[in-house]
Amino acid sequence: MGRKRCVGGDGSKMAAGCCGVKKQKLSSSPPSGSAGPGGGGGSHCSGAAAAGGEPGALPPPGGPRLNGLGGLAGGAASCALSPPLPPSCGGGPAGLSPSASSLLASPGSGGPGCRKMVVSAEMCCFCFDVLYCHLYGYQPPRSPRFTNDPYPLFVTWKIGRDKRLRGCIGTFSAMNLHSGLREYTLTSALKDSRFPPMTRDELPRLFCSVSLLTNFEDVCDYMDWEVGVHGIRIEFINEKGSKRTATYLPEVAKEQGWDHIQTIDSLLRKGGYKAPITNEFRKTIKLTRYRSEKMTMSYTEYLAHRQHHFQNGIGHPLPAYNHYS
């Protein structure tokens, strides 16, 4: 990028969540009628809540979860579908979207010399397993076959043809993937404070995204990041002298059509900053940029994926989904 970078920024102890629901109207002053970072406008995840309940502040020790802020974006229509017990998930393309199937077929991130990607469609499949078993009262699925290396991660749920946000919570603390995906699958589906807990009727309309966060870098210039490439986490001191944080995953700014300044200003507002935003204040922000590997799978793709591998004897046999007594 040609700009001087600061050292550090491994992000191992940060926590946050971030996704988009609808476009925000940005300005240098707080939105009228706003009651804080959750009051109206677009609903994006932002900084974690501190022990004192301040949205957007750093999380307390041992509390890496973040419930996003903002209003509920529409209700999901009921869908009377009682899906059959799915067989276990394997690896390989089967009825997946082009991005998912191509990554399964060729997990490398590009040409020669590119790093092999870690995220996989099987991770989304496992998240659906976990949610399915919880909603239908079955024992949790067995451990998956993909790597159990630790990564900061997010699990995002969207619903319907317009893919409205239905839940997005994650952690900047590196977690082993098997336990981390189990935890944040249910946390994002059931405990995102913007939405009611997910129900069985919504399953057929869901999309699951798994994001693994990598390449954390502290930068000295708040403009030293690229829209659509980097996620950003900002830390700042608000008008009351309190330290606050907020973050957006890499796709958010691009999906909203924002430039650098609009993204920074949106994060400041979502982090609870209410004073006018000046260029001098922006220069006081501490910014950490990062990248992510992301995979998305619909519920329909999930069923087709599992059925394909079950029929062809690939992957695990049918798990012991014994109903709780």
Image (spheres, rainbow, N blue to C red):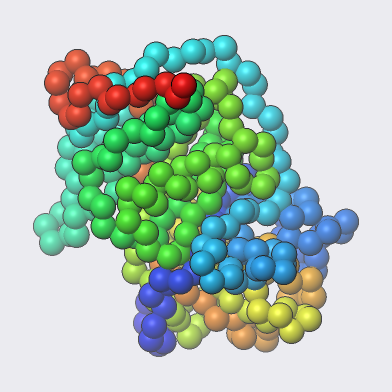
**Residue at the far front in the pictured view:** 325
The answer to which quarter of the image holds residue 165 is top right
Looking at the image, which residue is at 18% across and 50% down?
A: 108
Report the side of 196 relative to 92 (left or right).
Answer: right
The image shows residue 264 at horizontal and vertical percentages of: 61, 69
Which residue is rendered at x = 15% and y = 18% of the image?
312
Q: Is residue 269 visible?
A: no
Where residue 185 sits in the image (x, y, percent)? Answer: 46, 42
Report x, y in % for residue 92. Answer: 19, 32
Residue at the image point whose x is 74% and y is 55% from the top = 38
Relative placement, left or right, of 8 versus 318 is right
Front-most of residues 102 and 67 = 67
> Which residue is the extreme one toward the right?
33
Q: Is residue 179 above or below residue 174?
A: above
- Quarter holding the N terminus is bottom left
| Occupied quadrant, residue 267 | bottom right
Between 126 and 97, the one nearer to me in the picture: 126
